[in-house]
Image (cartoon, rainbow, N blue to C red):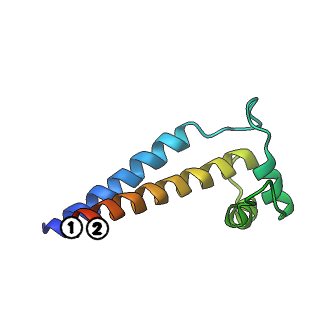
Amino acid sequence: MSTREGEAKELGWLALVVFACFASGAAGGPHPYDVGELAGAAAMLSGSHGPGQPLHALLGHAVLFVPLGSSAFRLSILSAAGAAIAAWAAGHVVLVVSGRV
């Protein structure tokens, strides 16, 4: 296995571990410490507070049509996937900056 393939595999494992950590804490319904405005923005396809998170609202609206658990759970899984992608991207940036890629 080449070094590049090994690094790609490591980044994949990193993303999988981050997804598993976030998904294990996915809420099955309303959470006492969450106001749910991002879920509301996804359901109504509207903006939420200040920055707005338009991509989360658009993807969240599409995820709400998937018949898998409650809407809060589906949106939590979407957020877990976003965290996994962000972890993968951050790891890739570290590899590029360090000169390993």
Question: Could you say where residue 14 lies in the image, as x and y percent from the top left?
Answer: 36, 51
Give the quadrant of the N terminus: bottom left
**Circle 1 sits in a helix, a strand or a loop, which is it?**
loop
Q: Residue at x 75, y 60 (%)?
A: 52
Q: In which image quadrant can residue 99 be found?
A: bottom left
Q: Residue at x 57, y 36 (%)?
A: 25
Label number found at residue 99: 1
Residue under label 2: 96
Q: Identity of the amino acid at label 1?
A: Gly
Q: In which image quadrant can residue 73 be found?
A: top right
Tell me whether the residue at label 1 lies in contact with that at label 2, contact meaning CB atoms closer than 8 angstroms: yes
96 and 22: which is toward the camera: 96
Q: Residue at x 72, y 66 (%)?
A: 54
Residue count near mark 1 (Cα–Cα under 10 Å), binned few <14, some 14–19, many ≥20: few
Question: Could you say where residue 88 lies in the image, as x and y percent from the top left?
Answer: 40, 59
**Circle 2 sits in a helix, a strand or a loop, which is it?**
helix
Q: Identity of the amino acid at label 2?
A: Val
Q: Residue at x 27, y 60 (%)?
A: 9
Question: Could you say where residue 89 lies in the image, as x and y percent from the top left?
Answer: 42, 63
